Amino acid sequence: MSSPSPVTPRLDAKVPVGAIADKWQNHKFSMNLVNPNNKRRFDVIVVGTGLAGASAAASLGELGYRVKAFTFHDSPRRAHSIAAQGGINAAKNYPNDGDSVHRLFYDTVKGGDYRSREANVHRLAEVSVDIIDQATAQGVPFARDYGGLLDNRSFGGAQVSRTFYARGQTGQQLLIGAYSALMRQVAAGTVELHSRSELLDVVKKDGRACGIVTRDLLSGEVTPHSAHAVVLATGGYGNVYFLSTNAMMCNVTAAWRAHKQGAFFANPCYTQIHPTCIPVSDDFQSKLTLMSESLRNDGRIWVPTTFDDARPAADVPESERDYYLERKYPAFGNLVPRDVASRNAKTVCDEGRGVGPLKNGVYLDFAAAISRDGLEAISDKYGNLFDMYHRITGENPYEQPMRIYPAIHYTMGGLWVDYHLMTTVPGLYCIGEANFSDHGANRLGASALMQGLADGYFVLPYTIGDDLAGLLGQAVVPTNDPVFTEAVRGVEDEQKRWLSINGTRSVDHFHRELGRIVWEYIGMARNQPGLEKALTEIPALREEFHSDVRVLGSAETLNQSLEKAGRVADFFDLAELMARDALEREESCGGHFREEHQTAEGEAQRDDENFAHVAAWEWNGDGTAQTRHREELDFENVALAQRSYK
Amino acid sequence: MSEGHGETINVTLKVWRQDGPDATGRFEVHHQAISTDASFLEMLDVLNEQLNEAGLEPVAFESDCREGICGTCGVMINGRAHGPQRATATCQLHMREFRDGDEIVIEPFRAAGFPVVRDLAVDRSPLDRIIEAGGFISVNTGAAAEANLTPVPKEAADQAFDAAACIGCGACVAACPNSAAQLFTSAKVGHLGLLPQGQAERWSRTESMVEAMEEFFGSCTNHGECSEACPKEISLDFIALMNRDYMKAKIRNRSLAGQH
Amino acid sequence: MAQTTGQRYRVAPVRPRGREWPFPLNLYQSAVGRKWVMAVTGLGLIGFVLIHMIGNLHVYEGPARMYEYAESLRSLGGGLVPQGTVLWLLRLGLLSMFVLHLHSAITLSRMSGNASEKAGRISGAKKYEGGRDHLAATYASRTMRWTGPIIALFILYHLADLTWGWWLGDDFVAGDPYHNVSESLGNLPVAVLYVVANIALAWHIFHGAWSMFQSLGVNNPRYNHLRRALATGVAGLILVGNLSFPLLAQAGLIDEDGRTCPVGEVQGNACLADQASDH
């Protein structure tokens, strides 16, 4: 099953030469430009209107390109970027605490467990400062101090305060900023807005992306759209686990269908687990809710020392409590990185020391903080989060400890892109969480918003021109071209197929079952037997799905089951690839923890000798295994080292 | 422990079903046993699962983040937008707010500006239309000045944030007896109008947003239902601010703005 | 080439925008502006009602003082303009405020009706078929559209009763308000009518006087909490004052028992004028 893939030619990311700090500056000068008057002769499709998509569409529209923006939501303001709570990093060094572009670059490479591309990360750190300026000018109400200047906080264990925030709603405020910039261009006529339109295929002609096919979610109409370039900004695939902190509609379909058209899919096994989520409470649970990581600054994490302890928290005496993070990591204690905190929670629950009715959580206890700082101080800091917890669980965290458990939160894997953010399909770009991104094997807190906006505002608008300049004078492929009519027919046939299966179980049923397999075997900790098991269970369940799913209704109206059917089908394919990717990556790094590869103390053990590369998978058609390509990662500016939090 | 862990209650659901925008709708009655730990939308998920099993089409309703921030969800529950709990979007409402034997009437948000798409799903795109009319600060990417060049008094920033917290769910319109969208519009007018960055377009923005709003929604009679239904508890004060700014915008001669 | 608004959004405007009228008529074109007009005229009308009520308190000082008060209204403006000119101008102003208030109310309520009730009609439902809860809207705010017409009809009745003397017939004496009031309000059904109408009026003002601040955008967190108190105070004052007339008339406090001047001398009742100046 897991025969190693043949060695394939090294993927070229087209990273510019020169010193790390000069690459982007020099490259901006060396790229081809499109004359301002010629920009209006280029059509660009942007799919997705989250932070990356909205910022890209708005910026391209401002430059004068003819942009078509697509969202499957009812409004471009709904994308899941909106749910990010913590903040956004930028190397502004306002607090004068020693931050710099180089330090942000260094921290991000290290935090990503040395599995990201240095040149991209450095560029990200460089433009981070521009994002703050841009967002502030748009009216994003970042937190301010009493002098009226922007406030910063330290986030996710960072040694400097570089996180800008807007209460606990930073993602919302940044998205509203990008959305309003987008709507301004919509009003100006430079951006066509297509809401409730879901991408169901990417279309190529002569090897180059020339458009997409969408389905109108209200009328069911399937429509081809052509353009000179296509940009996917369609988010991550955390919902392959069914239960995640992602929004209900988040899916991999756009990226996956691009993958099927030749875009390589990189590092699918890099998924991030967030340690502080509310544990599952019932079988029908639809999604998980994240409680901000900041809670770990004041909460103490513990479980009872005894197994199957059913006593309420208050009745467990101090001597029978195991503050396991403080015990194992005296230096960082409760503030160890996300992956470490998560794995340890899993370990104690697997031991049978979990708490709560389903024994599936650990305590996050504020009693000490409340008696130290007073109830009011804690309520000032975390009131909103405590209220949300109370609403969801019915338990009052001021009186009894919160129960938390890790959950899937973000996916570092995604479509492989070069330095220009172009996929392996010419003319097809991928930005934001949907690409394999700058986060390596693990994303630092407050870096997702930074990357989405960097791609959309300050990277893609430059790099796309370099490619488009060569197309001057070429018309788009007409939508009556056979490549489009065929793609449209394919999508229509797919809709009919789902409706005609008429099996016995719902789409959600299969999605939930798939999620159980993926969480069990490709979750927080992976091992060879488990992954091999996943590789037999996933195809079996997929077969059942394709023969026994029941999708009622018609394709001509709003039909949410029908929408989900296609998305879940793609999750099945992705899940299989995740398992293969995890199996082949014989090391532990960041969010990918292979139990076979750990230090004597149970920490992740990288294998830089053999795995300091990106694995990028090439689609070879249905029923044929993908080919694994490699992009070697060179670390010239950051020395490889073992992370330690003792 | 706390109240009602895992307790199961039986409720009678009267759910609005409507096949399409032009179809005639009706109530459908379902009896549902559900754990009080379930969220309201999970209860509808369970109902849909059962409907699907019985060969009946699931109830269409919209939701996405289920964390009360994206604004996708929203239905009328027993005559209240987003249901009985204050400052809570439908997706954050849990079944422990209900008692065994309760009848729960579920209807779509209704307004002529929010036509029903199917069952409980409505089209709220006129809200985007209002933002398109001026709900932005015109600054091209790259044209922004250094962020700390303009200090913003903390109080102003905080108040702007209170308005900016709007999630665009449309509950204000649904709750308003006149289907007015004053709270939504004034939240954006207030957010941008209170910040120094938003001053250049303050008057033109207010004018065009109000006029776009009036193409789709009713007139405000100051009932205050909107603020009460708002999951983010946005204050009516922003409506007053918008009204004042609108009249100023209409009456002032803006070419003289630089003279004082 | 560019996408049109109609292609972008499926929902057509409920109230499509027409050509903009010239300034200042354009203020009245928008609902917010119209609401502003309603607030300004409402403020004027409240002012009138208050002054009218206070002036009428002269009735408790007897026929002579009442006569003098009525005369002073007619001679507003002193010798500068012919007798009654200012009063007529005031009446005209009052009438136009009243008409604007009414017109804005009717048109805005039709606009809101189109934006709300029509929603349900498409699908065969009322706005909320399953009923709805009101959490913030007061009974007063929800009944403005009922109290308004009640007040309008009452004003017509009131004018016909005490200004034009339609119902009193021979008992109506122009220029002798005390007599007319005691005649009219001494009648039980009429007194009941006045009581009902004035409750409606106070009810209307209870919401209107608060709502006015919102519509005009008079808003300052420092004194916002006073707006409700002020509205309640004004409505209460008007209620107590205005209710006193029919109630006390029924109780016998406004009657002609103590009257020394004859009824019936029309313009320039010398006896009443003398009594007033003796005072």
Image (spheres, grey):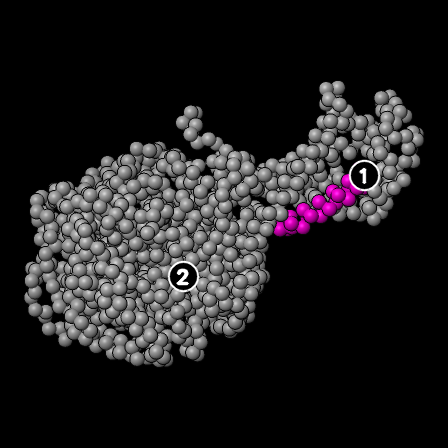
Q: Which residue is mark 2?
A: B63
Q: Vertically, is A553 above or below B243?
A: below
Q: Can see residue B43? A: no
Residue plotted at (53% across, 54% down): C115
Q: Vertically, is B143 above or below C12?
A: above
Chain containing mark 2: B
Q: Is residue B29 magenta?
A: no
Residue A596 or residue C86, whichever sits in front: C86
Residue plotted at (16% across, 62% down): A207
Question: Quarter of the image containing the C terminus of chain C?
Answer: top right
Residue C269 falls in image quadrant? top right
Q: Are marks 1 and 2 on the same chain?
A: no
The spot of residue A334 in percent (x, y) is 27, 53
Label 2 is placed on what type of residue?
A: Ser
Chain containing mark 1: C
Instruction: Tell me the chief SS of the magenta region.
Output: helix
Query: Within 10 Å of the Cα at label 1, are there few (<14), some (14-19), or many (20+) other Cα atoms?
Result: some
* Element marked by disc 2: loop
Q: Which residues are magenta?
A: C138-164
For the residues labelled 1 and 2, the Cα–Cα distance comes to 64 Å
Q: Which residue is mark 1?
A: C164
The spot of residue C40 in percent (x, y) is 60, 36
Label 1 is placed on what type of residue?
A: Trp
Q: Is residue C152 magenta?
A: yes
